[in-house]
Image: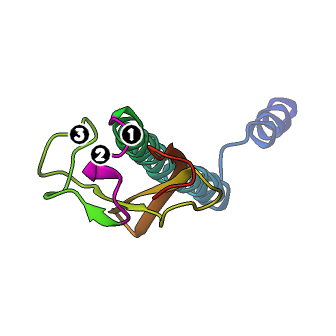
Amino acid sequence: MCSARRQSSRRRGIRGISLLEALAATTLLGTALLAFSSNSISLTRSEKTADNVSAAMGLAQERLELMRSYPLGCPQHNPGNYADATTLKADGTANGLFTRTWTVSAINVPRPGLKTVTVTVSWTDSRSHSTQIAAYVRCSTSPCT
């Protein structure tokens, strides 16, 4: 009889995992994995947007530098709105994601002897984006004529 009591107490001490505990652990693990995957998707989208903003700023800067390199009084400095003939890729070649436009202000804006060149680069991925930068271009005479 003594041995029967010892055996039953040993069985009570050995515990397994109940179905409820296994279900709770599985639910917790599934929730953590879902949160991780959702966060990974969000980070990937943010990284792609940052890449596109960087490329757009490069395209805008390229146009500004080109406008500033033209000689004073050239036809490219005439006031007006302009655009590239095609959409652009990040490296400036044709048929890409980006649309680049630029505006040359009226003469003597913001001050005598200067014109303002504003470049806007737009693109659409999951939503529409645009970035804009501006710089001054000297006129051939001061004030501009």
Give the CA distance from mark 1 to mark 3. 25 Å
Secondary structure of residue under mark 2: loop
Q: Quadrant of the C terminus?
A: bottom left
* Mark linked to residue 136: none
Q: Is residue 97 above or below residue 141?
A: below
Q: Earlier in the sequence, mark 3 or mark 2?
A: 2
Q: How many marks?
A: 3
Secondary structure of residue under mark 1: loop
Residue labelled with disc 1? 72
Give the residue type that dot 2 points to. Cys
Corner quadrant of residue 70: top left
Give the residue type that dot 3 points to. Gly
- Residue that appears at 18% across and 51% down: 96
Give the residue type that dot 1 points to. Leu
Classify residue 96 as left or right of residue 64.
left
Q: Which tag is nearer the camera, tag 3 or tag 2?
A: 2
Residue labelled with disc 2? 74
- Residue that appears at 42% across and 37% down: 68
Q: What secondary structure is the stretch in magenta mostly built from?
A: loop
